[in-house]
Image (cartoon, rainbow, N blue to C red):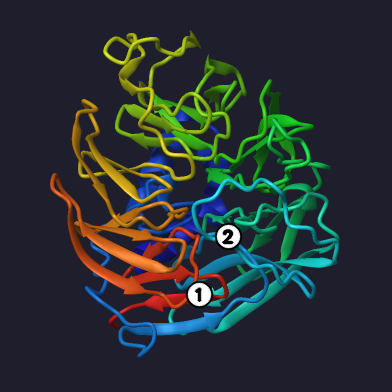
């Protein structure tokens, strides 16, 4: 706890210093991992794991066995819980008339939900120990500018925090930065961000790219029908440091940070424009086109490799790119010889919805249809393929202490043993649909279902 408090103080008083030098950037990156928070989408820079968390081996939502708290969250939201010390942050969009809920299952419907009622976009802060509300803020009120997919909501993106700033991005409804006590520090309006399928422009599916904090910088990605850009903002003021327009179709990907030696870069997934940018200047370092034409997963970084995957259309790539990649990169014609910029490449092993999990030198890829494949993270060799369940899976897998946690859309949590052989340890019902990636903290697993947030803990 003392280390967490110290880190929070460092962040508050020394954030600008982190952004001044490249070597300080890398120190910040390392210190964030050591600080053991779950600060944004999938935790520490989308890694999806936190070891030594001492999570319970089992729990029961119905009987409250190993349930610390179980609270109702109004409205609809697919944002994952974000955790810093004893605070949990989450968002939602509340409407008095939207009664459709989520349409779960394996289907190909593209029509959005028709709802022109007024919504309230909310940011919540809860006490992690008790589940009690610390503060609640109404970020925006109005009729949504973009419709949502039946599996989507108007509050899809996950909050990012550094222990002082709390940033929520609602797409067309704005970007908001609070402090941890709920005071609004600044906000930005980027206008209409129409996240719609490029083939059928009426198929509006809503925005879903989460912000990322790095030092005193905020990274955002917005690929939509009418606009496509990646930008870095000053975290203290919201001022644009740089913005790069992108020749891209709509995407729902969250950006990430990687290092080329000592230089911090921004990694972005996409269809026409997958690539990397210099964090300081916005200079495009490399670019690659091709892949799944509805890009959703975030890039994942492990050691000197950057993993990208996507699916839909004629390609479903899963690839490991080397972190020193530069220039224009061609989509590989042969899996066995993808080129010097690749550690390995598959044309048909990617997932439509989920980001990969790299844990203990193994890469896990969970598909929408419940297919779980395990690869050697360095070589790309396929270790095993298994079907977790024939149910549908939207949430990304996460890991802790040798276990992998996977949540199905219908609301079952599958706990499997990590390693080179698949072994299911537990299947635990959550009581209702769940499309949200879990969050991990010291001794606690936090799950979000369609209407509730549940803290699992023995303590």
Percent x, y of residue 388: 29, 55
Q: Is residue 112 left or right of residue 325?
A: right
Q: Residue at x 79, y 58 (%)?
A: 114
Q: Residue at x 59, y 47 (%)?
A: 210
> Mark 2, residues whose alpha carbon is within 10 Å: few (<14), some, or many (≥20)?
many
- Label 2, on which residue? 78
Image quadrant in which you'd find residue 179: bottom right
Q: Secondary structure at mark 1?
A: strand
193, 22: nearer the viewer: 193
Quick one: quadrant of the C terminus?
bottom left
> Mark 1, residues whose alpha carbon is within 10 Å: few (<14), some, or many (≥20)?
many
Q: Is residue 70 left or right of residue 134?
A: left
Q: CA distance from mark 2 to mark 1?
A: 11 Å
Q: Secondary structure at mark 2?
A: loop
100, 59: nearer the viewer: 100
Q: Is residue 361 left or right of residue 188?
A: left
> In this view of the protein, can residue 406 be seen by the observer?
yes
Question: Is residue 186 placed above or below 377 in the rendered structure?
Answer: below
Percent x, y of residue 311: 48, 33
Do tag 2 and tag 1 residues touch (Cβ < 8 Å)?
no
Q: Residue at x 44, y 84 (%)?
A: 69
Q: Residue furthest left?
A: 421
> In this view of the protein, can residue 131 be seen by the observer?
no
Quick one: quadrant of the N terminus?
bottom left
Question: Is residue 382 placed above or below 88 in the rendered structure?
Answer: above
Question: Is residue 74 placed above or below 415 in the rendered structure?
Answer: below
Q: Residue at x 70, y 28 (%)?
A: 243
- Label 1, on which residue? 453
Instruction: Mark 2 or mark 1: name the one nearer the start of the chain.
Output: 2
């Amino acid at each position: 706890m003392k280390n967490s408090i110290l880190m929070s103080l460092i962040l508050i008083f020394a954030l600008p210093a982190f952004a001044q030098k490249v070597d300080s950037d890398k120190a910040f990156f390392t210190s964030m991992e050591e600080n053991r928070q779950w600060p944004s989408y999938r935790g520490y820079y989308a890694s999806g794991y936190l070891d030594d968390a001492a999570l319970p081996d089992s729990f029961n939502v119905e009987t409250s066995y190993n349930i610390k708290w179980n609270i109702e969250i109004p409205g609809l939201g697919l944002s994952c819980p974000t955790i810093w010390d004893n605070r949990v942050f989450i968002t939602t969009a509340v409407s008095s008339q939207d009664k459709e809920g989520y349409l779960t299952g394996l289907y190909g419907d593209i029509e959005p939900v028709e709802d022109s009622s007024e919504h309230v976009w909310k940011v919540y802060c809860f006490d992690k120990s008790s589940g009690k509300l610390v503060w609640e803020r109404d970020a925006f009120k109005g009729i949504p500018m973009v419709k949502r997919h039946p599996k989507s909501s108007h509050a899809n993106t996950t909050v990012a925090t550094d222990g002082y700033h709390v940033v929520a991005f609602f797409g067309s409804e704005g970007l908001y930065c609070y402090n941890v006590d709920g005071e609004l520090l600044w906000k930005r309006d980027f206008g209409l961000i129409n996240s719609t399928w490029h083939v059928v422009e009426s198929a509006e599916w809503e925005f879903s790219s989460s912000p990322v904090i790095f030092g005193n910088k905020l990274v955002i990605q917005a690929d939509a029908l009418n606009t496509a850009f990646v930008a870095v903002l000053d975290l203290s003021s919201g001022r644009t440091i740089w913005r790069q327009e992108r020749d891209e179709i709509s995407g729902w990907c969250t950006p990430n940070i990687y290092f080329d030696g000592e230089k911090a870069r921004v990694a972005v997934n996409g269809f026409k424009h997958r690539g990397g940018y210099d964090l300081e200047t916005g200079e495009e370092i490399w670019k690659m086109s091709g892949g799944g034409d509805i890009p959703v997963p975030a890039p994942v970084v492990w050691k000197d490799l950057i993993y990208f995957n996507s699916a839909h259309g004629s390609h479903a790539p899963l690839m490991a790119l080397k972190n020193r990649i530069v220039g224009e990169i061609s989509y590989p014609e042969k899996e066995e010889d993808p080129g010097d910029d690749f550690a390995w490449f598959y044309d048909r092993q990617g997932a439509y919805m989920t980001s990969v999990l790299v844990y203990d030198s193994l890469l896990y890829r969970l598909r929408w249809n419940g297919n779980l494949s395990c690869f050697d993270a360095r070589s790309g060799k396929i270790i095993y393929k298994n079907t977790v369940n024939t149910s549908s899976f939207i949430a990304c897998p996460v890991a802790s202490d040798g276990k992998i946690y996977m949540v199905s859309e219908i609301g079952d949590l599958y706990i499997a043993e990590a390693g080179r052989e698949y072994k299911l340890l537990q299947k635990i019902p959550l009581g209702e649909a769940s499309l949200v990636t879990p969050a991990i903290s010291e001794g606690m697993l936090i799950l979000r279902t369609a209407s509730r947030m549940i803290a699992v803990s023995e303590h």
